[in-house]
Image (spheres, rainbow, N blue to C red):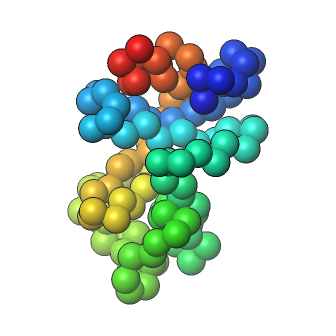
Amino acid sequence: LLAWPDEALVNVEGVATTTPHPRGRLIALRSARPLPWTDGVRYFGEAPEAPGLFIPTVQRPEGPLALLARALRRRLGDDGPLVWLPDGRVIALAASRPLGRAAVQAWRGA
Protein backbone atom coordinates (compact mmCIF):
# COMPACT_ATOMS: atom_id res chain seq x y z
CA LEU A 1 0.00 0.00 0.00
CA LEU A 2 2.83 2.39 0.75
CA ALA A 3 4.00 2.02 -2.86
CA TRP A 4 0.72 3.51 -4.08
CA PRO A 5 0.52 7.22 -4.90
CA ASP A 6 -1.22 9.39 -2.30
CA GLU A 7 -4.24 9.97 -4.53
CA ALA A 8 -4.90 6.21 -4.67
CA LEU A 9 -4.12 5.49 -1.02
CA VAL A 10 -6.42 8.21 0.27
CA ASN A 11 -9.42 6.21 -1.04
CA VAL A 12 -8.59 3.07 0.94
CA GLU A 13 -10.65 2.48 4.07
CA GLY A 14 -9.77 0.05 6.77
CA VAL A 15 -9.14 -0.85 10.36
CA ALA A 16 -5.71 -0.96 12.00
CA THR A 17 -5.16 -2.53 15.40
CA THR A 18 -3.22 -0.53 17.92
CA THR A 19 -0.51 -3.19 18.03
CA PRO A 20 2.04 -2.51 15.30
CA HIS A 21 3.13 -5.03 12.70
CA PRO A 22 3.86 -8.00 12.91
CA ARG A 23 1.54 -8.75 15.85
CA GLY A 24 -1.26 -6.43 14.81
CA ARG A 25 -3.69 -6.45 11.95
CA LEU A 26 -4.21 -3.99 9.15
CA ILE A 27 -7.42 -4.62 7.27
CA ALA A 28 -7.76 -2.65 4.06
CA LEU A 29 -11.09 -2.57 2.31
CA ARG A 30 -13.30 -0.54 0.04
CA SER A 31 -10.53 0.38 -2.33
CA ALA A 32 -11.43 1.76 -5.74
CA ARG A 33 -8.24 0.10 -6.94
CA PRO A 34 -7.54 -3.66 -6.70
CA LEU A 35 -5.36 -4.52 -3.73
CA PRO A 36 -1.98 -6.00 -4.71
CA TRP A 37 -1.38 -9.73 -4.31
CA THR A 38 1.59 -10.03 -1.97
CA ASP A 39 3.22 -12.95 -0.15
CA GLY A 40 2.33 -13.06 3.54
CA VAL A 41 -0.96 -11.19 3.12
CA ARG A 42 -4.29 -12.89 3.78
CA TYR A 43 -7.13 -11.91 1.46
CA PHE A 44 -10.81 -12.01 2.38
CA GLY A 45 -14.01 -11.92 0.41
CA GLU A 46 -17.60 -11.36 1.40
CA ALA A 47 -19.50 -14.63 1.83
CA PRO A 48 -22.43 -14.55 -0.66
CA GLU A 49 -24.64 -16.55 1.69
CA ALA A 50 -23.81 -14.27 4.65
CA PRO A 51 -23.64 -10.63 3.49
CA GLY A 52 -21.34 -8.57 5.66
CA LEU A 53 -19.22 -11.55 6.75
CA PHE A 54 -15.74 -11.55 5.25
CA ILE A 55 -13.87 -14.87 5.23
CA PRO A 56 -10.44 -15.85 3.89
CA THR A 57 -10.41 -16.52 0.16
CA VAL A 58 -8.54 -19.80 0.71
CA GLN A 59 -10.25 -21.09 3.87
CA ARG A 60 -13.84 -21.38 5.07
CA PRO A 61 -15.20 -21.89 8.56
CA GLU A 62 -17.14 -25.12 9.05
CA GLY A 63 -20.91 -25.04 9.00
CA PRO A 64 -23.48 -22.69 7.47
CA LEU A 65 -22.02 -19.20 7.14
CA ALA A 66 -25.36 -17.45 7.62
CA LEU A 67 -25.70 -19.08 11.05
CA LEU A 68 -22.11 -18.19 11.94
CA ALA A 69 -22.67 -14.56 10.95
CA ARG A 70 -25.87 -14.37 13.01
CA ALA A 71 -24.17 -15.91 16.08
CA LEU A 72 -21.16 -13.59 15.80
CA ARG A 73 -23.36 -10.51 15.49
CA ARG A 74 -25.40 -11.57 18.49
CA ARG A 75 -22.25 -12.24 20.55
CA LEU A 76 -20.60 -8.95 19.57
CA GLY A 77 -23.75 -6.85 19.55
CA ASP A 78 -22.64 -5.47 16.19
CA ASP A 79 -24.77 -5.49 13.04
CA GLY A 80 -21.97 -4.14 10.82
CA PRO A 81 -19.56 -6.04 8.61
CA LEU A 82 -17.25 -8.56 10.27
CA VAL A 83 -14.00 -10.32 9.39
CA TRP A 84 -13.66 -13.93 10.56
CA LEU A 85 -10.05 -15.02 11.16
CA PRO A 86 -9.14 -18.72 11.03
CA ASP A 87 -7.91 -18.63 14.64
CA GLY A 88 -11.48 -17.81 15.71
CA ARG A 89 -11.03 -14.10 16.27
CA VAL A 90 -13.49 -11.67 14.73
CA ILE A 91 -12.83 -8.06 13.81
CA ALA A 92 -15.72 -5.61 13.46
CA LEU A 93 -15.38 -3.34 10.46
CA ALA A 94 -17.95 -0.76 11.55
CA ALA A 95 -15.08 1.41 12.77
CA SER A 96 -13.35 1.47 9.38
CA ARG A 97 -11.95 4.84 8.38
CA PRO A 98 -9.82 6.19 5.54
CA LEU A 99 -6.34 4.82 6.18
CA GLY A 100 -4.05 7.19 4.35
CA ARG A 101 -0.26 7.01 4.29
CA ALA A 102 0.24 8.23 7.86
CA ALA A 103 -2.02 5.54 9.33
CA VAL A 104 -0.32 2.75 7.39
CA GLN A 105 3.13 4.02 8.37
CA ALA A 106 2.12 4.34 12.03
CA TRP A 107 0.72 0.80 12.06
CA ARG A 108 3.87 -0.52 10.41
CA GLY A 109 6.01 1.26 12.98
CA ALA A 110 7.77 3.33 10.30
- The residue at 72%/18% (across/down) is 5
Residue 41 location, x and y as percent?
Answer: 50, 48
Which quadrant of the figure contains the C terminus? top left
Q: Is residue 95 among the parts visible in the rendering?
A: no
How many numbered markers are drawn?
0
Instruction: Please give left or right for residue 91 compared with residue 99 in the image.
Output: left
- The residue at 55%/65% (across/down) is 57
Q: Quadrant of residue 29?
A: top right
Q: Return the residue nearer the eye: 98 or 60.
A: 60
- The residue at 50%/13% (across/down) is 102
Instruction: Please give left or right for residue 33 compared with residue 85 in the image.
Output: right
Residue 103 location, x and y as percent?
Answer: 47, 19
Which quadrant of the figure contains the N terminus? top right
Residue 94 location, x and y as percent?
Answer: 44, 42
Q: Is residue 95 above or below residue 45?
A: above
- The residue at 40%/69% (across/down) is 69
Q: Is residue 13 above or below residue 64?
A: above
